[in-house]
Amino acid sequence: MENRRRDVAVNAVGHAAKAGKTPAFERQRQRFFWLLLAPVLAILAVVTLLPTLYLLVTSFTPLNLANPATAWDFSDPLVNYRTLLTDDRLHNSFWVQAKLSVVTVVLQLLFGLVVALLLNMRTPLMNALRTSFLVPMVLPPIVVAIIWKVLYSPDISPAWWLFQLLGWNVQTPITDASWALTAIIVADTWEWFPFTMIIILAALAMMPEEQREAAEVDGASIWQLTWYITLPYLKGTLLVAGLFRLIDSIKTFPLIYILTDGGPGSVTEVSNYYIFVQSFSFSYIGYSAAVTMVLLAMIVVLSWVIIRAVSGGSNAQE
Amino acid sequence: MNGVRIEGVRKAYGALDVLHGIDIDIEDGEFVTLVGPSGCGKSTLLRMIAGLETISDGTINIAGRVVNEVAPKDRDIAMVFQNYALYPHMTVAQNMGFSLKLRGVDALKIKSAVEAAAEILDLSKLLERYPKQLSGGQRQRVAMGRAIVRDPEVFLFDEPLSNLDAKLRVQMRSEIKGLHQRLKTTTIYVTHDQIEAMTMADKIVVMRDGRVEQVGKPLDLYDRPANLFVAGFIGSPSMNFLPATMSAGSVRMADGIALPAGARADAGNAPQQVMYGIRPEHIAVAAEGIPATVSLVEPTGAETVLSFAIGKETLTAVVRDRLSVQPGDQVFLQFQQGAEHLFDAASGARLA
Amino acid sequence: MPRSKLDAAARRNRILANTIVIALAIITLLPFLWFVVMSFKPADDIFAGIDGFFFTPTLENYTSLWNDRFAGSMLNSFITSSVSTILALVIGTPGAYALSRATMKQERTFSLLILASRMAPPVAFAIPYFLVYRYMGLLDTRTGLILVYLTFNLALVVWLMRNFFDATPRALEEAAWIDGASLWKTFMVIVLPMSGPALVTTAILCFLYSWNDFFFALTLTRNNAMTAPVEVVNFMNYEGWEWGKIAAGGTLIMVPVLAFSLLMRKYLVAGMTAGAVKG
């Protein structure tokens, strides 16, 4: 009833409604949408934006938990950023990160592609087995780390039983400076090749049949088909999957924490891990915050690249 | 007045105008179809009447009340959507009774209203089913039932039959028409199918590119299309057009062939470029007349569609006799007296 | 080429491919199966090398877990994951709907914000949260963890549900408006009931992400609010290396995860690529 009366009242002016004036219902809708959105925006701001700002502020202080007075000391705001330029251990961590990221992404794309191409033959057996390839990816990351800890521990690992049988004397790679990173790469590849695989499989499922059929009619062999038709079709998908893995590889934590603890020395200490050590083991919070800001900046750039790549990729498909 | 009155209605999305000032008067109880090719703005106009799109300029008046500022629920309208828009988690009865329930009508009254509507639409046995358990035609009926139950001032239909197969479409077409004859509720029906428009409407509004091309009774549109677009759009197969020159009482094609134009060509003005229109059903094969070459013969059983070449132009004719002609045959064509239409070649407007 | 010859070649290829896939599947599953089997081994057999290959399965690893604090940490995991999931759904779903239906200019900014919060390394949040929680007394509390989990759950809900709403026809809402429903009523009575499956999917994904979390639990809890993943790792540090218990604990953590994720593997990728790819 209330509503009706208001509508009638509005009607009197309604006659004069001119272009550009939003009618009542439309205004009501916009107000309603903002009402629904407000809590999300508010809470997202509180739980993500504020902490990020605080992180930025902290990065300008020499905050050290051992000395609480340092929390609001802005006398030399750029001290951390200067230190960061000359911190060899940090530079090493970027280098380790680069090696780990590039190698794992390439391996994951390669394995993911091979398994996806195989599974795309879609025999009944393959359809039944497809799910089992997803297991590594869906396991809790901490459990994956523990599983590989078991595999790399000579006294309980089935691999070392085999080495023993063969009479080989093999060192465990996780305490060997020249093999520790490789050990992590192997585990990480095992954990995440299903991700690239499932994305590629999804793309293959959407591949227009006619393309393949036309090539088959033209007499292409299965290798030619894959090389000239399938792979070019998958280019965009591979790029996106690779970029996603690249960004996620920056977050690798449980594997390193459990398997090598960044060691031996600092051969497996990636940036993310270095920050963790600096902040939560040494309590150099201010400095860690500065390093994190740098890392965040890199991730924002990569995310931006992804968004561009994805929208570019979908344009190409249309 | 009752009915719907649309005055100077414009719709703009930013700088893009999709409706350029539409004026339509719809009388109480009338069945009006808005017809036109896709993108002509007919659905937008319908959604503006429903209150689902804002009105950039002009007014829409329903039953004597300007509704520009009125929310959809207060416009006293019911709408049948192209994809039916049935609530998937409600039974047929709940779907149909939803609007009454929202209005606080008591359960018994809702039940009897739903049952009455279901009776009309032959849905009585399906009331407890869910939309996903129904066939396309049944869903269509439920969508209509939902509209009927409300007993609104105006029914709005947005291409309601476009998702049905051809046979069902014909059947539903006559059902909707029958329903209107029974309920006499003002109805605005959007379609891109001119046959649907012709068969159902009391009045047709032909639209193109956000403008009204012609408003009129179905047969008036067929007999006296206001311009080339309407002439070509209404009727199937569509009207033949022959470019010609009109001067001193005769109409001739570029290669000199004279076309019968009777009194209409009498205007003794300067030579004028015209489009000569003749419907396929007004052409007959005869012993003498305009010479033509048969290029295609398509028998459909009841009638035969023939294509001819006249000079450089092609022409389609529909004849009911079974002629024994072959592609390549030379024949003569006779145009039915007075059935020709003349349009100005430049503006497309009807002459005389 | 004669038909039969072609068939034979095709069949050979299929058999070859099938064999390779079986081999790959075994390689993929072996580490995981080994771990599960280990959780049923008596302690002696775990270290018995090849001699421990055949063993009498036992539940002693699991029962010893139950006498431990592990049950409490499982409860912590469960409570923090569920509460955070529910909060994210309650707050995020209406927002996702609004975002899908309203015409807003800030859309691109918003999707970048969501992608960034999904991409940011946890340590970026852990540091400020650690400082603030220390001050507010939220360290080592379930409330603290629940709030942190909102950082990724809320973004996930908004993204996934928005994609869902984008794919649902608006005609149903329009029909409801014309039928006389208010905006709020339309959302509650028409939109939400249709979203059931999508809500369940999103809820499961949120739950799994929180359940799988290790980093925040490691840095923001000590004792009281410690979750199962951290507790399992603790078996490695003090009390020596209790591999049987570690395997049993790890198995318990991953059972619900495996069950849920394989049930809805179709949506896994949508969750993982949230922010960039329309699911």
Image (cartoon, coloured by chain):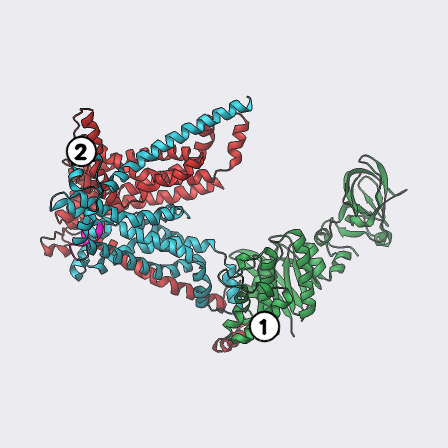
Chain colours: A red, B green, C cyan
Spot occupied by residue C233 in the image (x, y as percentages of width and height)? 18, 46
- The answer to whether residue A45 is visible is no
Kindly state the secondary structure of the residue where label 1 is placed: helix
Q: Chain of mark 1?
A: B
Spot occupied by residue C157 in the image (x, y as percentages of width and height)? 36, 55
- The answer to whether residue B329 is visible is yes
Q: Residues within 10 Å of mark 1 (few under 14, many from 20)?
A: some
Q: Chain of mark 2?
A: C
Q: Which is nearer the eye, B46 or A63?
A: B46
Q: Which residues are magenta?
A: C218-228
Q: Quadrant of residue B217?
A: bottom right
Q: Which mark is residue B113?
A: 1
Residue drawn at x 43%, y 67% as measured from the top left? C184
Residue drawn at x 37%, y 48% as measured from the top left? C263
Relative to B169, is A159 above or below?
above
Q: Residue type at mark 2?
A: Gly
Residue drawn at x 47%, y 78% as measured from the top left? A2
Q: Which residue is mark 2?
A: C49
Q: Main secondary structure of the magenta part?
A: loop
Q: Which is nearer the eye, B105 or A318?
A: B105
Q: Which is nearer the eye, A241 or A57?
A: A241
- Indicate the quadrant containing the C terminus of chain B: top left, top right, bottom left or bottom right: bottom right
Marks 2 and 1, how far apart at CA: 80 Å
Q: Which mark is residue A245?
A: none
Q: Residue type at mark 1?
A: Ala
Residue that extends furthest to the front in the rendered view of this protein: C56
Relative to C120, is C76 above or below?
below
* Residue C220 inside the magenta-drawn segment: yes
